[in-house]
Amino acid sequence: MQPVFPRWSNSIYRWTIAALLVGPASFIALLWVLARTPYYTGENAVRDQPVKFDHRHHVRDDGIDCLYCHSGAKTSAYAGVPAASLCMNCHSQIWTDSPELSLVRTSFYADTPIRWNRVNAVPDFVFFNHSIHVAKGVGCVTCHGRVDEMGLVFQARRLSMGWCLDCHRAPEKFLRPPDQVTSMEWVPAGPQIELGRRLKKTLAVNPSVECTGCHR
Protein backbone atom coordinates (compact mmCIF):
# COMPACT_ATOMS: atom_id res chain seq x y z
CA MET A 1 0.00 0.00 0.00
CA GLN A 2 1.28 3.42 -0.97
CA PRO A 3 2.09 5.53 2.15
CA VAL A 4 0.00 8.66 2.62
CA PHE A 5 3.05 10.84 3.33
CA PRO A 6 6.49 10.60 1.70
CA ARG A 7 9.41 9.40 3.81
CA TRP A 8 11.00 12.87 3.99
CA SER A 9 7.96 14.07 5.94
CA ASN A 10 9.37 12.17 8.94
CA SER A 11 12.28 14.61 9.01
CA ILE A 12 9.88 17.55 9.04
CA TYR A 13 8.03 15.95 11.93
CA ARG A 14 11.23 15.48 13.93
CA TRP A 15 12.45 19.02 13.25
CA THR A 16 9.07 20.44 14.24
CA ILE A 17 9.08 18.57 17.55
CA ALA A 18 12.66 19.72 18.20
CA ALA A 19 11.75 23.35 17.44
CA LEU A 20 8.77 23.20 19.78
CA LEU A 21 10.99 21.89 22.57
CA VAL A 22 14.13 23.94 21.98
CA GLY A 23 12.53 27.16 20.74
CA PRO A 24 10.89 28.33 24.00
CA ALA A 25 13.94 27.33 26.04
CA SER A 26 16.23 29.22 23.66
CA PHE A 27 13.99 32.30 23.84
CA ILE A 28 14.04 32.25 27.65
CA ALA A 29 17.82 31.81 27.61
CA LEU A 30 18.15 34.76 25.22
CA LEU A 31 16.11 36.98 27.53
CA TRP A 32 18.21 35.81 30.51
CA VAL A 33 21.43 36.75 28.71
CA LEU A 34 20.02 40.05 27.41
CA ALA A 35 18.97 41.11 30.92
CA ARG A 36 22.62 40.85 31.99
CA THR A 37 24.12 42.87 29.16
CA PRO A 38 25.12 46.55 29.47
CA TYR A 39 22.37 47.34 26.96
CA TYR A 40 19.78 46.41 29.58
CA THR A 41 21.58 47.19 32.85
CA GLY A 42 22.90 50.56 31.70
CA GLU A 43 26.44 49.71 32.78
CA ASN A 44 28.99 52.17 31.33
CA ALA A 45 26.18 54.36 30.00
CA VAL A 46 27.06 58.07 30.00
CA ARG A 47 24.36 60.68 30.61
CA ASP A 48 24.73 64.17 29.22
CA GLN A 49 24.11 66.84 31.83
CA PRO A 50 22.75 70.39 31.55
CA VAL A 51 25.99 71.71 33.10
CA LYS A 52 29.42 70.36 32.19
CA PHE A 53 30.47 69.31 35.67
CA ASP A 54 33.86 67.57 35.67
CA HIS A 55 34.25 65.28 38.69
CA ARG A 56 37.95 64.84 37.91
CA HIS A 57 38.59 68.50 38.61
CA HIS A 58 36.33 68.85 41.65
CA VAL A 59 37.22 65.55 43.34
CA ARG A 60 40.82 64.91 42.34
CA ASP A 61 42.21 68.41 41.80
CA ASP A 62 40.21 70.36 44.39
CA GLY A 63 39.79 67.54 46.90
CA ILE A 64 36.07 68.07 47.42
CA ASP A 65 34.61 65.23 49.48
CA CYS A 66 31.65 63.26 48.08
CA LEU A 67 29.51 64.14 51.10
CA TYR A 68 29.97 67.87 50.57
CA CYS A 69 27.81 67.72 47.45
CA HIS A 70 25.86 64.54 48.22
CA SER A 71 25.25 65.12 51.92
CA GLY A 72 22.04 63.06 51.93
CA ALA A 73 24.05 59.87 51.50
CA LYS A 74 25.08 60.03 55.16
CA THR A 75 21.67 60.68 56.68
CA SER A 76 18.97 59.43 54.31
CA ALA A 77 18.07 56.92 51.66
CA TYR A 78 18.90 59.36 48.88
CA ALA A 79 22.32 60.86 48.19
CA GLY A 80 20.75 63.84 46.46
CA VAL A 81 22.34 66.42 44.18
CA PRO A 82 23.66 69.79 45.31
CA ALA A 83 21.50 72.89 45.06
CA ALA A 84 22.81 75.78 43.01
CA SER A 85 23.41 77.67 46.27
CA LEU A 86 26.04 75.07 47.21
CA CYS A 87 27.76 75.49 43.86
CA MET A 88 27.73 79.26 44.36
CA ASN A 89 29.66 78.92 47.62
CA CYS A 90 32.69 78.63 45.36
CA HIS A 91 31.50 80.05 42.07
CA SER A 92 30.43 83.39 43.49
CA GLN A 93 34.19 83.93 43.77
CA ILE A 94 35.74 81.92 40.94
CA TRP A 95 34.63 81.57 37.30
CA THR A 96 31.99 84.19 38.07
CA ASP A 97 31.48 85.13 34.43
CA SER A 98 31.97 81.70 32.83
CA PRO A 99 29.29 80.92 30.23
CA GLU A 100 29.56 77.27 31.30
CA LEU A 101 28.02 78.27 34.63
CA SER A 102 25.26 80.51 33.33
CA LEU A 103 22.62 77.89 34.14
CA VAL A 104 23.95 77.59 37.70
CA ARG A 105 23.72 81.34 38.20
CA THR A 106 20.24 81.44 36.68
CA SER A 107 19.12 78.59 38.95
CA PHE A 108 20.52 80.35 42.00
CA TYR A 109 18.99 83.77 41.38
CA ALA A 110 15.65 82.41 40.13
CA ASP A 111 15.51 79.82 42.95
CA THR A 112 14.66 77.04 40.49
CA PRO A 113 16.39 73.64 40.54
CA ILE A 114 18.66 72.38 37.78
CA ARG A 115 17.21 69.26 36.20
CA TRP A 116 20.13 66.86 36.28
CA ASN A 117 19.91 63.55 34.44
CA ARG A 118 20.14 60.65 36.86
CA VAL A 119 23.03 58.28 36.19
CA ASN A 120 22.74 55.53 38.83
CA ALA A 121 19.27 54.21 39.56
CA VAL A 122 17.51 51.06 40.69
CA PRO A 123 13.89 50.24 39.79
CA ASP A 124 11.09 51.83 41.80
CA PHE A 125 10.24 48.48 43.39
CA VAL A 126 13.73 48.26 44.93
CA PHE A 127 14.41 49.86 48.32
CA PHE A 128 17.95 51.17 48.70
CA ASN A 129 19.21 53.28 51.59
CA HIS A 130 22.47 55.17 51.14
CA SER A 131 22.91 56.03 54.80
CA ILE A 132 23.06 52.45 56.07
CA HIS A 133 25.70 51.55 53.50
CA VAL A 134 27.81 54.59 54.36
CA ALA A 135 27.52 53.88 58.10
CA LYS A 136 28.52 50.24 57.62
CA GLY A 137 31.67 50.97 55.64
CA VAL A 138 30.65 50.47 52.01
CA GLY A 139 32.79 52.83 49.96
CA CYS A 140 31.36 55.14 47.33
CA VAL A 141 33.79 53.67 44.81
CA THR A 142 32.35 50.17 45.41
CA CYS A 143 29.08 51.10 43.73
CA HIS A 144 29.97 54.20 41.72
CA GLY A 145 33.47 53.41 40.51
CA ARG A 146 36.37 55.86 40.29
CA VAL A 147 34.30 59.01 39.96
CA ASP A 148 37.47 61.05 40.40
CA GLU A 149 38.60 59.77 36.99
CA MET A 150 35.35 60.52 35.15
CA GLY A 151 34.85 63.60 33.02
CA LEU A 152 31.22 62.70 32.52
CA VAL A 153 29.91 60.34 35.20
CA PHE A 154 28.69 56.99 33.96
CA GLN A 155 27.14 53.96 35.63
CA ALA A 156 30.18 51.91 36.60
CA ARG A 157 28.43 48.79 37.93
CA ARG A 158 25.56 46.55 36.83
CA LEU A 159 23.42 47.39 39.88
CA SER A 160 21.48 44.19 39.28
CA MET A 161 19.92 42.03 41.98
CA GLY A 162 22.63 39.42 41.59
CA TRP A 163 25.34 42.05 41.85
CA CYS A 164 23.84 43.41 45.08
CA LEU A 165 23.40 39.92 46.55
CA ASP A 166 27.07 39.11 45.91
CA CYS A 167 27.92 41.86 48.40
CA HIS A 168 25.13 41.03 50.84
CA ARG A 169 26.26 37.40 50.99
CA ALA A 170 29.94 38.25 51.54
CA PRO A 171 30.22 41.88 52.72
CA GLU A 172 33.68 41.26 54.15
CA LYS A 173 35.05 41.43 50.60
CA PHE A 174 34.06 45.07 50.30
CA LEU A 175 33.98 46.71 53.75
CA ARG A 176 36.34 49.52 54.72
CA PRO A 177 36.67 51.79 57.77
CA PRO A 178 33.73 54.24 57.82
CA ASP A 179 36.12 57.22 57.80
CA GLN A 180 37.45 55.99 54.44
CA VAL A 181 34.07 55.56 52.76
CA THR A 182 34.49 58.55 50.45
CA SER A 183 38.15 57.92 49.62
CA MET A 184 38.71 57.06 45.98
CA GLU A 185 42.23 55.70 46.45
CA TRP A 186 41.99 53.82 49.73
CA VAL A 187 43.46 50.31 49.80
CA PRO A 188 43.62 48.00 52.84
CA ALA A 189 46.96 47.77 54.64
CA GLY A 190 46.56 44.00 54.87
CA PRO A 191 44.34 41.28 53.41
CA GLN A 192 40.87 42.65 52.64
CA ILE A 193 39.11 39.53 53.92
CA GLU A 194 40.71 39.78 57.36
CA LEU A 195 39.90 43.49 57.65
CA GLY A 196 36.42 42.90 56.31
CA ARG A 197 35.70 40.19 58.88
CA ARG A 198 36.81 42.47 61.73
CA LEU A 199 34.70 45.36 60.43
CA LYS A 200 31.73 43.07 59.88
CA LYS A 201 31.83 42.16 63.57
CA THR A 202 32.67 45.63 64.87
CA LEU A 203 30.05 47.43 62.79
CA ALA A 204 27.44 44.67 63.25
CA VAL A 205 27.09 44.18 59.53
CA ASN A 206 24.38 41.64 58.78
CA PRO A 207 22.81 42.45 55.41
CA SER A 208 19.59 40.75 54.48
CA VAL A 209 19.45 38.26 51.65
CA GLU A 210 15.68 37.83 51.98
CA CYS A 211 13.32 39.31 49.39
CA THR A 212 11.83 41.72 51.94
CA GLY A 213 15.24 43.26 52.53
CA CYS A 214 15.04 45.21 49.28
CA HIS A 215 11.46 44.67 48.08
CA ARG A 216 9.03 46.24 50.55
Image: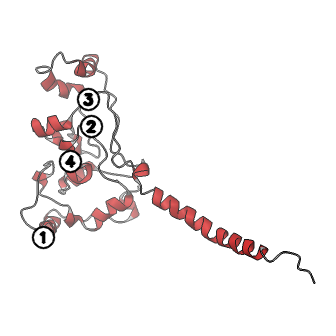
Q: Is residue 24 above or below residue 71?
A: below
SS state under label 3 = loop
Which quadrant of the view contains residue 187?
bottom left
Q: Mark 3 near mark 4, Cβ–Cβ under 8 Å?
A: no
Q: In front of the other: label 2 or label 1?
A: 2
Residue 150, image x, y percentages? 22, 41
Marks 2 and 4, how far apart in space? 12 Å
Residue identifier under label 4 = 146
Residue identifier under label 3 = 52
**Amino acid marked by disc 2:** Leu
Q: Quadrant of the N terminus?
A: bottom right
Which quadrant of the view contains residue 20?
bottom right
- Earlier in the chain: of badge 3 and badge 4, it is 3
**Amino acid marked by disc 1:** Glu
Q: In front of the other: label 1 or label 3?
A: 3
Marks 3 and 2, how far apart in space? 8 Å
> Which circle marks residue 152 in the picture?
2
Residue identifier under label 1 = 194
Please state which of residues 12 and 203 is positioned toward the viewer in this rendering. 12
Answer left or right for 21 relative to 103. right
Answer left or right for 211 relative to 20. left
Q: In front of the other: label 4 or label 1?
A: 4
**Amino acid marked by disc 4:** Arg
